Image (tube, coloured by chain):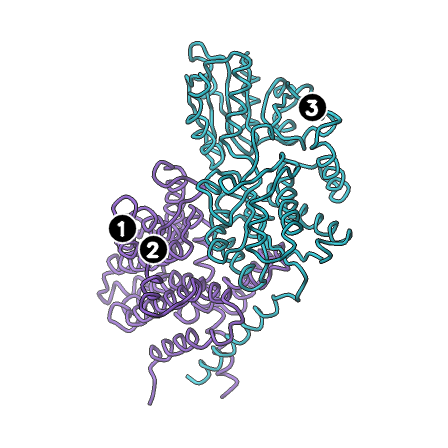
Chain colours: A purple, B cyan
Amino acid sequence: MKLSNKQATLLVLALLIAITPFFFPSSYYYRVGSLIFVNGIAVTGMVILIGYAGQISLGHAGFAGIGAYTCALAPVHLGLHPGLALVLGAVISAAMAWLIGRPILRLKGYYLGVATLGFGILVSMVLANERDITRGPDGIEVPDLGLRGLLKDMGLNLNNSEFWYGFTGLALLLGAWLALNLFNSPTGRALRALHGSEIAARTVGVDVARLKLQAFVISAVYASVSGSLLALQNKFITPDVAGYMHSIEMVTMAVLGGAGSVLGAIFGAGILTMLPQVLTVFAEYEQLMLGLVMMLVMIFMREGLLPSVLRLIRGRGE
Amino acid sequence: MKTLTTTASATALATLMALGLAGTAMAEIKIGASVSETGPAAFLGDPEAKTLKMLVEDINANGGVNGEKIELVIYDDGGDPNKARTFATRLVEDDEVVAIVGGTTTGTSMAIIPVAEDAEVPFISLAGAIEIIDPVKPFVFKTPHTDRMACAKIFEDMQKREITKIGMISGTDGFGASMRNQCLSIVGDYGIEVLADESYGPQDADMTPQLTNVKGSDGIQAILNPGFGQGPSIVTRNYAQLAIDLPLYQSHGVASKGFIELAGAEAAEGVRLPGNALLVPDLLAEDDPQKPVVTAYKTMFEDKTGTPVGTFGGYAHDGLRILVDAITRAGSTEPVAIRDAIEATSGLVGTTGIYTMSPEDHLGLDLSAFRMLEIRNGEWTLVE
């Protein structure tokens, strides 16, 4: 049976998620795994925005912040179940992305980068300063999702890290599946045309403005869900989640691994999430090494790490 | 397709190996720490990390605890609560430590708490906020005094000077805002009225307008500035420039030599703040129980690092001392036994104060831990 690219990617991802736990010496590795998945979800959104549509955003952590704080606040103030708060966060993020996307997506290149950067900083400032609601820079507790307890009642007793590994792993698979479907849809093709050349795409009748907005809104939802899952998992969140560094991290992960491919971007998320854990001994040089890796990838592997490595292997095989 | 799977599995394998390599060898007593050595809270976390490493080395050189050596597993969370939580998980699950000291900021401490509570491993936090120990959580303790205690100390001093009407100017950062709220909630108990309540952002470079407002309020007798970092230094400088002739109170958040240098000795003249014994070891009475402890720590830290000792490293000193004392008394390295022993800490002399814990009090300090200090000619002096 011949597998399509989409099926192959999903299969690899599912196998990786399912098999690696057999090699885990302790449940700390589940925690690292679930962080990779949470970042992977945000980065999959970046693939749609950067890889498919060719737009840049330096403010997506803002949406992660909206998602995270909705999970912290909606259960307390609106009495919503934390799971529904995740959905509400995604809806708010989508609405916000739609509202701000309409004017700022007219911008290109650096201008778009700076405008989105401004949005991200704005969100993190609101979260830090509206202390009557958000409790300010010291952060706020997030209610328990309750699903783990439910599974326990059903006879499936998982520890916290194991549960979140499984839960975020499934969420990542779902996110990757949706993104890959989009890639192969007419919208996906139009997005890629837009990436190739905006003028050419417009000439063949692609509604450029609408498509850019769509990609922006979809990627915002991914970022929001990722923020929500992080908040629910940590049961505590600070405005750092919406910070500028987090936005840059998302872009870096996508570009490092390969912004054009879902698997590549998730691979990038994996590397950058694990790096600080592996490099604890060199903690002082972490930023330096990160910068070096990034520069080397940009100079020698412009498609990103995974696609370039794959091409190298394929080239040798022939 | 085949190549894709091969690469992916190779990646997974490499990943596992890399993570595996990061693990460490077995030791006798493993104590974990996650502090913010780098990042925005580095001025707190760096002396904390240095203190922990230095003390563990010293304890081991002197025969260890109950005849066993301590191994310190220390991670740098960069002030990021998400990282702190991951490192706490790693300490508990992978390194299998018997207790955790750390959590430099309130944010990182709050992120570590659920992990420690879940795993039933004692955690001694080095952060200020009262939320960490109120309500009391079985496995969570902390060493720095709370904002509310600093407010109480300041208001007591104001009462002594018969000050009843004050103005406040607070930073909007986590520390300043939290202390402002705590001060406002207890100010009434001291018969003091707050006539002006101004604020400034953590990055602001000039507080003259706010201070002019405070100064302009009728009948004001003193100014209180809850804040952290550079803000209080600027307030102090502006206060001198405006020639405000009222007593100025700063918080324990700026109890370091750096504050006097930044504000300038002339501007800081007469400023009062609640500090701890560590700042003034030479001024302590000979029979003060804290004198030998703070002198020993100050000498050791300054010899070892070549940098002046500060309040924040002292929090780590006290955290480790409490832990080591508890392990000694428990005669066991079982986390639950250690927890029980920490809760029974009694009369332990630290640099911050003298700790006596109880099931209702996981901080164990009272107001006597604070000394009211006044800056004279660029030096700390004791008021009392």
Rendering coords of residue A165 (x, y %): 42, 66
Q: What element carries label 3?
A: strand
Mark 1 vs mark 3: same chain?
no
Marks 2/3: CA–CA distance: 51 Å
Front residue (pair A107, B53): B53
Mark 2 vs mark 3: same chain?
no
Please tell me which residue is depicted at 65% across the width and 55% down the height of the picture.
B72
Rendering coords of residue B91 (x, y %): 56, 59
Q: Which mark, by number, is residue A224?
A: 2
Q: How many marks?
A: 3
Q: In which quarter of the image is the C terminus of chain B?
A: top right
Rendering coords of residue A130 (x, y %): 36, 37
Residue count near mark 2 (Cα–Cα under 10 Å), binned few <14, some 14–19, many ≥20: many
- The residue where tag 1 is placed is A92
Q: What residue type is labelled 1?
A: Ile
- The residue where tag 3 is placed is B379
Q: What residue type is labelled 3?
A: Glu
Mark 1 vs mark 3: give the one in front.
3
Q: Earlier in the sequence, mark 1 or mark 2?
A: 1
Circles 1 and 2, Cβ within 8 Å, touching? The answer is yes
